[in-house]
Image (cartoon, rainbow, N blue to C red):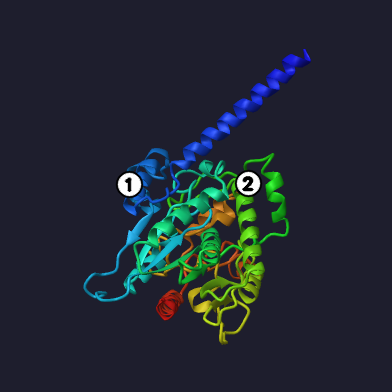
Amino acid sequence: MRQKIALWCLGVFALTVSVIGHATEEQAQFIYQPEESFAHYIARAEQYVNERKLWIKSDDKPRELAAVLPFELLPDAESCAGRTSIGVLLSHGLSDSPFSMRDPAHALQAACFQVRVVLLPGHGTKSEDLLDVSRDDWRATFRNAANAFSKDVDVMYVGGFSTGGALAAEYAWQHTERVAGAILFSPVFKVNSSIDWLSPWLAMFKDWLDNYPSDDFAKYASIPVPAIAEVYKLSKEVRHLILKNPKTLPVFIALSEDDQTVDSSVSEKVFNAGMVGPKSQMVLYSKDQMSANTDRIKVYNTNWPEDRILGLAHMAVHGNPENPYYGAAGEYRICGWYQADESLYQTCRTDGENWFGEKSSALTKNSPHAARVSWNPNFNSLMQEVAFFIKANAK
């Protein structure tokens, strides 16, 4: 009897390994492959996403597909002729898609840089695809894309948003001979939670804390616990890498002190103690601090009552107010705070005099159904600073 039970347990274990192995192999189809051309990667991604994506509106598939695919932007051949070939590789964050990087990508293209944006494994399709993806899958895509891009341009920068920022910082620290610098928007060096360390343990028993259907074609509404655990591990590893190995490599980092997704105080510590180069710069947005300017850090106050904005949210830092989807007059308003209350959710989405910001008691005093701001009124100035940083440090 014991032998039969042991054999049954072994069979279940083998089946589990088989299922996990299959999922990993399936996701691996979407990892940027070594020596792969970017054009081939885009074509392969289009087929993969088209087969797996959960469509928000079935009659709007072309738009939804285009939004989540990796893409490349080339500088204007006439106005940018004769300039050094400078490339910038960007990555989005957890639960996002390349659509979230379109605003900075277009601004960098206008400044005569060649820009590529990757799609991290598990993204752009449906949130369930994040269940079996590891941080090493994300690393492989970013690493292989960067290695290939470095051969196509004279000078290469790497950058990204949130999880993408952590991946870019890690690659820059490990490949200083290939990169001229890093550009980080709201990078995650620690999740903004005192119990984030529990996520790897919780992931062994639970897939979801919540699982809401998304009404946003460019972003998942919910994130599975295993993916959160992978971000926790990645951010911890990258944070330790930088703090234990301070470098003078030029880094431009823009973040909000009021960010409720990443711990901005830890990001500031990483910048001050690990990104020690005199050419490194931080742009810090704060609803409480007064605007100020030092050699390496600029602070911008984000109490903008004329715009009904109090503090910048995690994804707002690199968002263009003119974006037709996420911008100030865009068609999509982020009200995920109220998903459990349909009435409050719809009020947030439709109130023409609503306030915007990052979640805080001060914000809810202005409006009990305030929305999460997804654009930065200072976007154009920010991207001018980024362009100047790139040109000044190109080597």
Q: Is residue 68 left or right of residue 75?
A: right
- Mark number displayed over residue 276: none
The residue identified by callout 2 is 225
Looking at the image, which residue sits at the far left? 78
Q: Residues within 10 Å of mark 1 (few under 14, many from 20)?
A: few
Q: Position of residue 121 (x, y in %)?
A: 48, 47
> Which residue is drawn at the image coordinates 60% and 54% (left, top)?
231
Place of residue 230 in the rendered image (x, y in percent of width and height, measured from the top left): 61, 50
Please report the residue visible at 62 percent of the width from the left and 81 percent of the height from the top: 289
Where is mark 1, residue-wise? 43
Front residue of 38/98: it is 38
> Of the residues tagged 2 and 1, which is closer to the observer?
1
Q: For residue 381, what is the image quadrant?
A: bottom left
| Of residues 347 and 128, the one drawn nearer to the viewer in this rendering | 128
Residue 302: image x %, image y %? Answer: 55, 77
Badges 2 and 1: C-beta atoms under 8 Å apart?
no
Q: Earlier in the sequence, mark 2 or mark 1?
A: 1
Name the residue at 55% across, 55% down. 336
The kind of residue tagged 1 is Ala
Q: Can the viewer see residue 95 in this picture? A: no
Question: Residue type at mark 2?
Answer: Val
Q: Secondary structure at mark 2?
A: helix
Q: Is residue 37 above or below residue 380?
A: above
